[in-house]
Image (cartoon, grey):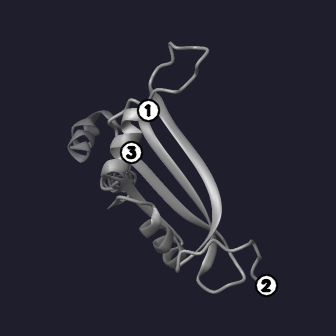
């Protein structure tokens, strides 16, 4: 669709064929970019293990936990969870992870201003985690 628009505008634009080809290629590339594939999870644990193994993981919370959070924050929007490795720890299979949970349409619990509008909210926290489920004390990996 974007390429067709560029072709229709061609008589009105003065540019070389190579410039037009570059613009068309950029337009087609930008239109084929997709959102991050998110794994449906009922808990964050599978994402933690994936992030330890692959450096990052992306999920969407489903099930009872998602329903509870949706009711609490008055939003039916998906609850997205992004986990990234922050640093390796001294023990094999253990890393410091950053977990960001976000949701659109959240009504904030601002007790002083009841008139807040629904908005995208995110919460990030970090902790140490091992593949076997342990949460070890912080020890940086030797350089």
Query: In the image, is residue 47 above or below residue 115?
Result: below
Q: Which percent across, then down, holds residue 16?
A: 38, 50
Read off the residue under disc 2. 142
Distance, label 3 to label 1, CA atoms, is: 52 Å
Residue pictured at 24% horizontal, 39% vertical = 5
Residue pictured at 58% horizontal, 14% vertical = 113
Query: In the image, is residue 28 above or below residue 55?
Result: above
Q: Image quadrant for the C terminus?
A: bottom right
| Contact (Cβ within 8 Å) of mark 3 with mark 1 | no
Label ID, residue 15: 3
Label ID, residue 129: none
Residue 27 versus residue 119: which sits nearer the camera? 119
Looking at marks 3 and 2 on the same chain, the residue that comes earlier in the sequence is marked by 3
Tag 2: Cα neighbours inside 10 Å, few (<14), some, or many (≥20)?
Answer: few
Distance, label 3 to label 2, CA atoms, is: 56 Å
Q: Which percent across, then down, holds residue 68?
A: 37, 41
User: Picture quarter containing residue 140?
Assistant: bottom right
Read off the residue under disc 1. 73
Looking at marks 1 and 2 on the same chain, the residue that comes earlier in the sequence is marked by 1
């Amino acid at each position: 669709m974007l390429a067709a628009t560029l072709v229709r505008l061609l008589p009105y634009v003065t540019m070389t064929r190579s410039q037009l080809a570059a613009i068309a290629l950029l337009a087609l590339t930008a239109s084929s970019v997709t959102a991050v594939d998110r794994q449906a999870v009922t808990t964050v644990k599978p994402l933690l293990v994936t992030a330890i193994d692959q450096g990052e993981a992306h999920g969407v919370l489903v099930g009872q936990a998602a329903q509870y959070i949706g009711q609490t924050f008055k939003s039916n929007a998906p609850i997205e969870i992004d986990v990234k490795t922050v640093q390796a720890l001294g023990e094999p299979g253990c890393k410091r992870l950053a977990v960001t949970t976000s949701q659109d349409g959240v009504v904030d619990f601002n007790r002083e201003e009841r008139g807040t509008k629904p908005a995208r909210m995110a919460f990030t926290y970090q902790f140490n985690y091992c593949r076997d489920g342990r949460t070890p004390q912080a020890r940086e990996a030797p350089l």
